[in-house]
Amino acid sequence: MSSVSVTTTSANIIPATSRKFLILQNISDEDIYININGPVTVADGAEAGLRIKADGGSMSFPDLISSSRANDFSVHAIHGGVGSKSLRIIEG
């Protein structure tokens, strides 16, 4: 388990790598938005992200190795508040 800092600028927070599962948990006080394999924004539009709610919201990608989906995606993240926020990562 590890944590990464998410800022107000879209950034690649998890590089593409082969994995069996991925769990993301927002341990900050601001909603965090993620996108797979590309930049993300907090606004609606082409780069709109998936929201992980503040204070413990989570998103999981279980059983990637046995699925037909690619399991080597990167994750980009951003938040709309001030400063940096923490996102917990569990992958394997």
Image: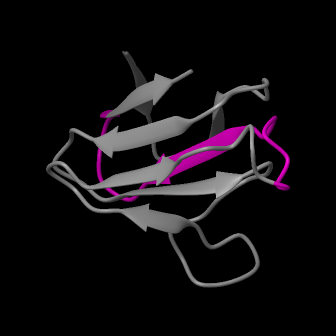
**In the depicted view, which residue is nearer to us: 21 or 24?**
21
Residue 22 lies in quadrant: top right
Q: In the figure, is residue 19 to the left or right of 8? A: right
- What percent of the width, then of the height, locates residue 71? 78, 40
**Residue 83 counted in the magenta span:** yes
Residue plotted at (14% across, 50% down):
55
State the residue in front, 90 or 28.
Answer: 90
Position of residue 25 measured from the top left corner of the image (x, y, whole percent):
32, 42
Q: Which residue occupies 65% across, 58% down?
A: 40
Question: Which residue corresponds to the image point at 65% horizontal and 31% vertical from the top-left?
Answer: 20
Which range is magenta? 68-86
Q: Quadrant of the C terminus?
A: top right
Q: What percent of the width, then of the height, locates residue 28?
A: 21, 41
- Total numbered labels: 0
Q: Image point 78% across, 25% down: which residue?
A: 18
Q: In this view, does 89 lie to the left or right of 41?
A: left
